Image: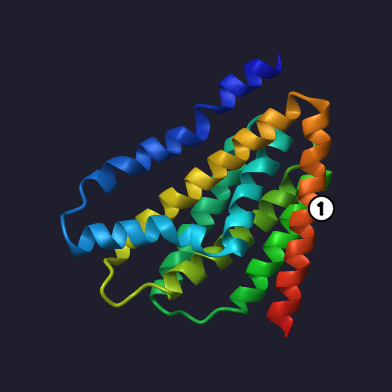
Amino acid sequence: MRSGRLARFSGGLPGLLIILLPAAAQAHPGGSDTSLITGLMHPVFGLDHLLAMVSVGVVSAQLGGINIWRVPLAFVGAMAVGGALGILQAAALDVELGIALSVAVLGIGIVLAHPRMSPWPITALVLLFGACHGHAHGREITVSANPALYTLGFLIGTSALHLLGVLIGAAARMQAALWTGLRLAGGAVAASGAAFLLQALG
């Protein structure tokens, strides 16, 4: 039964990547390629971004069903909007505080999430957190970068990290020991988020 679930979700996020990758393949040599690669790598540079994006995938797998693709897609969609606002240097609330909070909350989500709980509170928070992360990425774009390719790059990079989280969460659902270990890891992520929060508030 669980192997059937694994087969069903394995087509979700890769499908999102398949939609995005043809546009990436059309990048022109030179500066445009640099913009795309910079965007691809940007989500990995900061530990706060990395933990939050992998955690989104983990939580979506823990919720199961349609949430395996709906929760990450909500994050990516909100991130695209936030990224556009960041590129335009639009004013926003304390984005760094929102990013730190996202790590703490998603870590708690890993500890608590299960298939029988309502997905909507987590989905709503994921929308908010996606916008915060996107705004931060967009705000940090270099003058020489192509905004469209840079945005495409960090959306693809984020989707790949979500997929990694989904695979981790799905593997943990197959063995009780891994499930327990995943919840302990979620506690460590939440503690990291608390540290990020203290730093942001300081």
Name the colour scheme. rainbow
Q: x, y (%) of residue 161?
A: 53, 47
Q: Is residue 169 above or below residue 98?
A: above
- Residue 117 seen by the camera: no
Which of 97/82 is in front?
Answer: 97
Q: Residues within 10 Å of mark 1 (few under 14, many from 20)?
A: many
Residue in front for this viewpoint, 38 or 27 = 38
Q: Which residue is mark 1?
A: 187
Q: Which residue is depicted at the point 57% across and 37% down?
A: 69
- Whether residue 168 is visible to the viewer of this picture, yes or no, is yes
State the count of labels: 1
Eyeballing the image, is 155 above or below 147?
Answer: above
Please provide percent x and percent y for residue 20.
Answer: 36, 43
Picture quarter with the N terminus: top right
Tell me the residue at 68%/62% (across/down): 102
Residue 141 coordinates in the image, percent (x, y): 38, 72
Q: Residue at x 39, y 55 (%)?
A: 40
Classify residue 104 by image quadrant: bottom right
> In what quadrant of the picture does the C terminus appear?
bottom right
Q: For this rendering, which residue is in front, 136 or 126?
A: 136
